[in-house]
Amino acid sequence: MAGTFTKDQAGELAFDFRASYDGFDPIHLWTNVEYFPKTDSWYTYLDANYRIGKLGLIGIETENMHFPSKDDDWSAGPRVVLPLSEGRLVLIGAYQFHNGKNSNQVWTRAVLNF
């Protein structure tokens, strides 16, 4: 897949690969890898979750930016996934510990499945 990453009202070409794997049930894996040729930079994301019955999932995630001419931004941390309404609405919370000068981050996401 290809697309555009927009920052400060300027677009940058991005090549995007996403995949998931559920073959190790109750372990679920999901990844996203993006390449930005203009800046020769990479974005990588991976999460691994353990399903706890119908209650939800607990796991870990790592979200990283890789740059050719400056220090990479690495992060890792725990995550919780709570499916509601038979999975039509999914709430996700994560805490990311970042390396170096970057601040740790709390992420909250809501996914609506049609």
Image: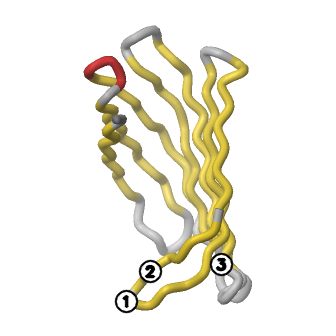
What's the distance in space between the residues labelled 3 and 2, CA to CA?
Answer: 12 Å
- Position of 99 relative to 101 (above/below): above
Q: Which residue is mark 1?
A: 9
What residue appears at the point 31 percent right and 35 percent down from the top-left corner? Answer: 91
Number of numbered discs overlaid on the protein picture: 3
In the rendered image, which quarter is residue 87 located in?
top left
Q: Position of residue 10 (x, y in %)?
A: 44, 90
- Position of 25 relative to 40 (above/below): above
Among the two numbered marks 1 and 3 on one chain, the one whose residue lies closer to the N terminus: 1
Looking at the figure, which quarter contains the N terminus? bottom right
Q: Amino acid at mark 3?
A: Phe
In the rendered image, which quarter is residue 38 located in?
bottom right
- Position of 45 relative to 30 (above/below): below
> Could one spot residue 97 in this view of the protein?
yes
What residue appears at the point 50 percent right and 76 percent down from the top-left corner? Answer: 5
Q: Which residue is mark 3?
A: 36
Q: Amino acid at mark 2?
A: Thr
What's the distance in space between the residues labelled 1 and 3, CA to CA?
Answer: 16 Å
Q: Amino acid at mark 1?
A: Gln
